[in-house]
């Protein structure tokens, strides 16, 4: 009952991909005898933070790796984009080394499956180096390359590099025994650009953290919290105009935890609605969870796109609190599809009138106790364990 997992992004838990990989690994620890995890070394401090995994039944193999810069200047952003794309085009030293370690481990152990988690695509590059690919499951957390994604995520793509990256992805799809996607919408986008047999695919949603519960506050405001950065791609003025249109008697206050695109804060000041917003900046994981628990509802915003091939991991995180969730997204998105099946959730498009209507409704509606945490079942550890067990049964 052994598994081998290859996930470059794991140790740096400020990274969303790393958080997803860790949640996946923790979900499988309880049902498999041993997990070997090949990852990339960041710092000794971050490695020590995950040593608790080895106290159970997991062994980490952190290998030296290159990382893109995290500067905020225009030059930093350009360099980061080029560097990140090159690392997803040409096999890196880390990917070669991860493949070699994986082969050595496979010779010494009888694994039920070898699972590579990408993004980044380097994890799948390591999978391409496997001598025996009969147990290989390749999981795509998002579409790749960037040119496949709808605007604004495909802005500034590099055509020649994109073509080479598509070749890497097609090789991964061809050579892996099974392919996993986070949602059906992501699989449909892949099918428009790559050739594969649908019968070798399956859906593995993100893993939610352990369930927790909201706490009551003393004030009379209705606080709707957006946890995580509000990036350029997900900023749109209509949200702020809709808040301005709320009657004075309405108690809605929107709280943003994390970095916020500067134009958003500037618009709040321009409209004179500072009393309706709280900008906390980046908080620790513990403080973020505390503020989420003290909220009355949670806000999820997807970028305005023509198609919606993503399942935001934020939805899995939100589901663990059992609070009302309001998503501003496309009507055909995976998010809308999931939330519309539950009473304790709200979905709208990006029109200011639609948003204002939902904000009025959510702040006056009574919560349904019977339905409040049903969404969690779709992202629960039990659900993910069942999916992976079924996939492994298909390999053997």
Image (cartoon, grey):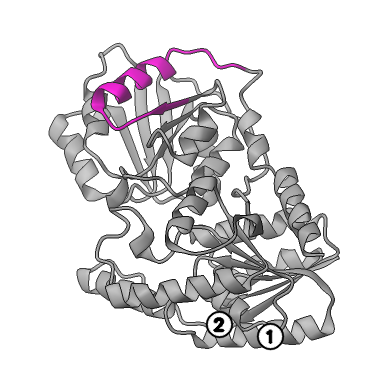
What residue lies at 79% left-to-right and 66% top-to-bottom? 55
Give x and y (percent) for residue 282: 40, 51
Quadrant of the rendered image containing residue 59: bottom right
**Where residue 30 sits: x, y (%)?**
81, 55
x, y percentage for residue 299?
42, 34
Residue farthest to the left, as pictured? 270
* Residue 112 is a magenta residue: no
Provide the residue span drawn in magenta: 346-368
Quadrant of image for the C terminus: bottom right
350 in the magenta segment: yes
Assign a secondary structure to mark 1.
Answer: helix
Pick the front one: 40 or 88 = 88
Q: How many marks?
A: 2
* Residue at x 44%, y 84% (from the top left corner): 90
Q: Residue at x 48, y 47 (%)?
A: 185
> Circle 1 is placed at which residue position?
101
In front of the other: 110 or 218: 110
Q: Which mark is residue 95?
A: 2
In this rendering, position of residue 379 left or right of residue 219? right
Q: Which mark is residue 383?
A: none
Give the structural element (helix, strand or loop) at label 2: helix
10 Å neighbourhood of mark 2: few (<14), some, or many (≥20)?
many
């Amino acid at each position: 009952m052994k598994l081998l997992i290859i996930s470059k992004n794991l140790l740096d838990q400020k990274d969303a991909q790393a958080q997803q990989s860790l949640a996946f690994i923790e979900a499988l620890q309880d049902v498999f005898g041993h997990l070997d995890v090949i990852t990339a070394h960041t710092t000794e401090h971050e490695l020590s933070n995950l040593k608790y995994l080895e106290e159970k039944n997991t062994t980490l193999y952190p290998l030296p790796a290159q990382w893109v810069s995290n500067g905020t200047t225009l030059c930093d952003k350009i360099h980061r984009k080029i560097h990140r794309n090159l690392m997803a085009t040409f096999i890196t030293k880390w990917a070669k080394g991860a493949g070699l370690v994986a082969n050595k481990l496979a010779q010494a152990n009888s694994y039920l499956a070898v699972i590579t988690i990408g993004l980044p695509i380097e994890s799948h590059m390591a999978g391409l180096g496997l001598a025996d690919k009969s147990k290989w499951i390749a999981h795509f957390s998002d579409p790749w390359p960037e040119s496949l994604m709808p605007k604004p995520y495909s802005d500034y793509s590099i055509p020649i590099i994109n073509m080479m990256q598509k070749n890497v992805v097609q090789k991964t799809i061809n050579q892996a025994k099974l392919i996993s996607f986070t949602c059906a919408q992501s699989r449909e986008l892949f099918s428009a650009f790559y050739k594969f047999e649908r019968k070798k695919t399956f859906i593995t949603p993100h893993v939610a953290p352990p369930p927790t519960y909201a706490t009551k506050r003393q004030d009379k405001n209705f606080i709707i919290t957006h946890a995580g950065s509000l990036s350029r791609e997900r900023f749109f003025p209509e949200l702020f105009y809709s808040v301005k249109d709320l009657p004075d008697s309405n108690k809605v206050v929107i709280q943003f935890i994390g970095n916020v695109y500067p134009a958003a804060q500037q618009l709040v000041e321009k409209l004179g609605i500072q009393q309706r917003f709280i900008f906390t900046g980046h908080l620790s994981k513990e403080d973020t969870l505390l503020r989420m628990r003290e909220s009355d509802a949670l806000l999820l915003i997807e970028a305005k796109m023509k198609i919606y091939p993503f399942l935001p991991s934020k939805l899995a995180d939100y589901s663990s609190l059992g609070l009302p969730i309001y998503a501003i997204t496309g009507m055909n998105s995976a998010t809308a599809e999931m939330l519309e099946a539950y009473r304790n959730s709200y979905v709208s498009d990006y029109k200011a009138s639609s948003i204002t209507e939902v904000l009025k409704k959510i702040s006056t509606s009574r919560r349904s106790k019977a339905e409040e945490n049903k969404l969690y079942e779709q992202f629960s550890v039990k659900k993910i364990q069942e999916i992976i067990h079924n996939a492994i049964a298909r390999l053997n």
